[in-house]
Amino acid sequence: MKLKMSRSTAIETISGLLILLFMYTAISKFVSFKTFMVMLKLSPLVKSHFLFVAFAVPIVEIIISGLLFFQRTKKIGFLSSFILMLIFTLYIAYFMLFADDKPCSCGGVISQMTWGQHLVFNIFFTFLAFLGYRLMKKGQPEDNLPFKAAIQ
Amino acid sequence: MKKYLIGTLAVVLAIGAVAFTAPSKKANTYVQFVGNPATLTDVQDQTQWEQAVGTPSCDLVNRKACRIQIDDSKLITNPGGPLLPKVLDAAKVTSISAAHNVDNTFYVPTALNGTPGTYTIANKN
């Protein structure tokens, strides 16, 4: 029973941290929307679709926050978070390896980080999202057993 | 309700954090070069100089066009639409003088013509 409690606490904590991250960066992008667009326009990877990306990224972040908020959609929320964080991490790694100019199109105080710090930060949250997904997957069969609490 | 407590707290914290870190309106306005610095007509094109909310990072090395600090009354709505950042007003900044950079590869602006008022050009490496 104790193990189940700590697992659910871990799931709630991880989802809370991811919601905080996605909501903060999404709102920051909308607040500084013009700066965000200029940065995307300067990015060699997305400049041809900068307007679409400028709207899509914060909207996707808010949708994922919504998925992580509700119990029924948390699992797909963790999976989506993992995929999105993986894309962000690969994007940063690409810039660190191949780009001369490195325009940071990140939201809020995260844009103040160095590229190395940003990479470590993203890897950490990618791992958290993966961990959340694994915990949800692991937890599901138990939740389906009504007599599990009695056994424990 | 209890199971939504952490999620709700996270949303409230995120909104609060943005409110405390939102950029304040600055007296200095910067336009940032968004064109190709290897193309002379891009550097001379007023619409390739877009307003930046913060201060674009430029190391002042005269290799590539980067930013110009200018009074925001010299800017107009982007021809691409009102959602896009403002650009230099061609009625006030009638032309932009540009020259080859230190190693003859890219172009950098050297002066604004017309009635640009006070401005500062900063280029980058």
Image (cartoon, coloured by chain):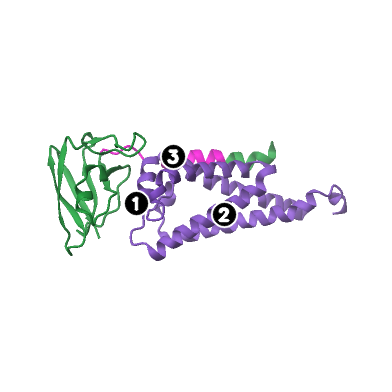
Contact (CB < 8 A) between labels 3 and 2? no
| Amino acid beneath label 2 | Ile
| Amino acid beneath label 1 | Leu
Secondary structure, magenta segment, majority class: helix
How far apart in space, not on screen, are marks 2 and 1 (Cα)?
Answer: 24 Å
Q: Earlier in the sequence, mark 3 or mark 2?
A: 3
Number of numbered markers = 3
Disc 1: which chain?
A
Residue A116 appears in the figure: no
Task: Give percent across and percent down for residue A142.
Answer: 79, 52
Q: Is residue A116 above or below residue A37?
A: below
Residue annotated with mark 1: A42
The residues colored magenta run B10-27
Give the chain coloured purple: A
Task: Give percent across and percent down for residue A80.
Answer: 59, 50
How far apart in space, not on screen, are marks 3 and 1 (Cα)?
Answer: 18 Å
Front position among marks 3 and 2? 2
Q: Is residue A18 left or right of residue B75?
A: right
Task: Say which colour chain B has.
Answer: green
| Quadrant assignment for the N terminus of chain B | top right
| Amino acid beneath label 3 | Phe
Q: Is residue B56 left or right of residue B102?
A: right
- Which disc is residue A83 wearing? 2
Residue annotated with mark 3: A30
